[in-house]
């Protein structure tokens, strides 16, 4: 005779989002899933214990990371049909630049019920706080580590017509700031750090301005960063030579304010306002 376990939720795998900083951001449904779990798959048990202890939850924790995922799948393969299993990451939404993809794919291919318990993440808040269009965006995960790969990565961002979102660690933020200044000086940039935490901050400006705002204080370099970059203007032509419009710009300056001239030229050419502003200032001098 099969014994059905009494539970408030069905058997299966639950992909549960956890707070990215502020523990009040956890949902009742997430707590219910964690409480009902037979065991919890996580990245770092020591980190996850802080969350579970906060809510008085005591469960068996199984560590899963990029180097042992296949081993964990083999270990659990015969123990998935009649269990409630919760997958969490150290913070935020699992599988988004975090391990677990292979495990979830295995469960789907083997008809194990999989559901998501959505919640906190850093991507959407960073977009909301950026002041940059979020109707269409591309997410690129973590910025690469090596100089060559960083160059290729930034080149991809540079040619993306949509808003770009990516993560960068505090170890690479200085390199990123230099690259933004050199390669994306005329794009609007937003960099958010420590989202939902006490030291949450968002820095906004063009690529050649953002570095100055961050280096003002050493503490600005601490934490994890989410970067939002304005997309390439679809109207702007490759290697657009603004100098060919010098005569027209001089005429506009005799009738309109600097701000109005920048707006008019931007609408007519699609060149970014920051680039036009710098050029018009140069002409005025």
Image (cartoon, rainbow, N blue to C red):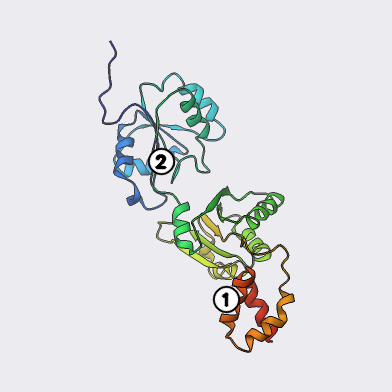
The furthest residue to the top: 1
Q: Is residue 284 above or below residue 86?
A: below
Quickly name the residue at label 1: 263
Numbered tag placed on residue 204 in the rendering: none
138 relative to 206, above or below: above
Say if residue 194 shows up in the picture.
no
Whether the residues at callouts 1 and 2 have beta carbons within 8 Å, the answer is: no
Q: Is residue 227 left or right of residue 208?
A: left
Q: In the rendering, at what x and y percent does residue 96 appear?
A: 50, 43
SS of the residue under disc 2? helix
Instruction: Find numbered disc 1 in the image and state the secondary structure of the residue it sits on.
Output: helix
- At label 1, counting other C-alpha atoms closer than 10 Å, the crowd grade (few under 14, some 14-19, many 20 or more) is some
Looking at the image, which is closer to me, 247 or 214? 247
- The residue shown at (48%, 57%) is 127
Q: Is residue 250 visible?
A: yes
Q: Residue at x 52, y 61 (%)?
A: 191
Above-or-below relation of 249 to 228 = below
Given residues 269 and 95, the one toward you in this image is 269
Which quadrant of the figure has residue 66?
A: top right
Is label 1 or label 2 in front? Answer: 1
Residue 158 falls left or right of residue 219: right
Residue named by callout 2 = 48
- Which residue: 44% across, 18% down? 78
The answer to which of marks 1 and 2 sits earlier in the sequence is 2
Residue at the far bottom in the pictured view: 254
- Nearer to the camera, 133 or 209: 133
Give how far across and how far down residue 24 sits, in percent: 32, 51
Residue 70: percent from the left, percent from the top? 54, 27
Q: Quadrant of the C terminus?
A: bottom right
Against 247, residue 123 (above or below) is above
Mark 2 nearby-residue class (10 Å; few <14, some 14–19, many ≥20): many
């Amino acid at each position: 005779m099969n014994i059905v376990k009494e539970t408030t939720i069905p058997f299966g795998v639950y992909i549960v989002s956890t707070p990215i900083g502020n523990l009040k951001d956890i949902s009742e449904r997430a707590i219910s899933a964690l409480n009902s779990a037979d065991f919890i798959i996580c990245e770092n048990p020591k980190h996850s214990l802080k969350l579970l202890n906060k809510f008085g939850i005591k469960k068996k924790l199984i560590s899963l990371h990029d180097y042992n995922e296949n081993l964990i799948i083999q270990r659990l393969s015969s123990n998935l049909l009649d269990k409630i299993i919760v997958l969490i990451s150290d913070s935020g939404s699992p599988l988004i630049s975090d391990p677990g993809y292979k495990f979830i794919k295995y469960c789907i291919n083997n008809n194990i019920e999989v559901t998501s318990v959505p919640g906190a993440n850093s991507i959407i808040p960073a977009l909301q706080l950026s002041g940059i269009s979020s109707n269409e965006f591309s997410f690129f995960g973590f910025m690469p580590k090596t100089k060559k790969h960083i160059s290729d990565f930034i080149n991809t961002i540079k040619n993306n017509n949509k808003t770009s979102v990516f993560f960068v660690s505090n170890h690479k933020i200085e390199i990123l700031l230099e690259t933004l200044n050199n390669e994306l000086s005329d794009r609007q940039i937003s960099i958010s750090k420590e989202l939902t935490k006490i030291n949450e901050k968002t820095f906004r400006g063009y690529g050649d301005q953002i570095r100055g705002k961050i280096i003002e204080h050493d503490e600005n370099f601490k934490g994890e960063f989410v970067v939002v970059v304005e997309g390439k203007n679809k109207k702007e032509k490759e290697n657009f030579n603004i100098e060919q419009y010098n005569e027209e710009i001089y005429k506009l300056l005799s009738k309109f304010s600097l701000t109005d001239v920048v707006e008019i030229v931007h609408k007519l050419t699609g060149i970014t306002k920051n680039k036009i502003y710098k050029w018009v200032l140069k002409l005025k001098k």
